Image: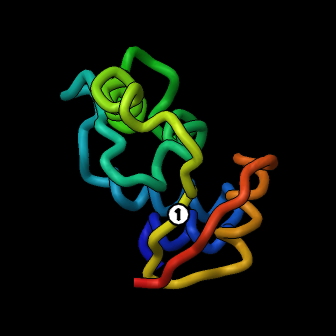
């Protein structure tokens, strides 16, 4: 599996950290100041990135947070109401559903396979 697959299917932290180490094996992490967590899965294992890359001054940037702020600012007033939470996936799994249940314990949701 690639890193996203490891996260999605519930790999343990050791395997996730191994994957991150392999990805950065030949990269001088002191040559940059920030790392963009550009996959929706990566913020879920931010601590693993910190463990591998060190807790130095490297900034881990999760674009989902900024996107959520913008959506709230620009769309919230017209989107207030009785909506449905939908997850569009390429493949369903018990691991995914368990993670959703742990992150959003009180919502009802629909999973759609695309």
**Up-down relation of residue 100 to residue 49 (above or below):** below
Position of the C terminus by quadrant: bottom left
Regarding residue 45, the answer to whether it shows in the image is no
x and y percentages locating residue 87 in the rendered image: 51, 65
Q: Nearer the viewer, residue 64 or 21?
A: 64
Q: Residue furthest top?
A: 57
- Would you say 78 lies left or right of 17 here? left
Q: How many marks?
A: 1
Residue topped by disc 1? 86
- Would you say 72 lies left or right of 8 here? left
Residue at 55% from the left image edge and 70% from the top image edge: 6
x and y percentages locating residue 62 in the rendered image: 39, 34
- Would you say 110 lies left or right of 33 here? right
Q: Nearer the viewer, residue 54 or 65?
A: 65
Q: Nearer the viewer, residue 108 or 63?
A: 108
**Up-down relation of residue 104 to residue 16 (above or below):** above
Quarter of the image for residue 11 reads bottom right
Identify the image's colour scheme: rainbow, by chain, secondary structure or one colour: rainbow
x and y percentages locating residue 82 in the rendered image: 59, 46
Q: Nearer the viewer, residue 39 or 34?
A: 39
Residue at 65% from the left image edge and 69% from the top image edge: 96
Residue at 42% from the left image edge and 73% from the top image edge: 2
Crowdedness near tag 1: few (<14), some (14–19) or many (≥20) residues, C-alpha within 10 Å: few
Regarding residue 77, the answer to whether it shows in the image is yes
**Up-down relation of residue 22 to residue 96 (above or below):** above
**Up-down relation of residue 71 to residue 59 (above or below):** below
x and y percentages locating residue 84 in the rendered image: 56, 57
What element does badge 1 sit on?
strand
């Amino acid at each position: 599996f690639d890193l996203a697959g490891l996260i999605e299917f519930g790999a343990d932290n050791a395997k996730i950290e191994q994957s991150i180490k392999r990805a950065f094996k030949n990269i001088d992490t002191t040559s940059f100041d920030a790392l963009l967590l550009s996959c929706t899965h990566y913020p879920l294992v931010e601590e693993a990135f910190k463990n591998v890359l060190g807790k130095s001054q490297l900034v881990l940037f999760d674009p989902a947070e900024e996107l959520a702020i913008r959506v709230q600012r620009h769309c919230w007033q017209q989107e207030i109401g009785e909506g449905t939470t939908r997850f569009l996936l390429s493949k369903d799994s018990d691991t995914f559903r368990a993670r959703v249940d742990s992150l959003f314990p009180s919502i009802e949701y629909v999973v759609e396979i695309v």
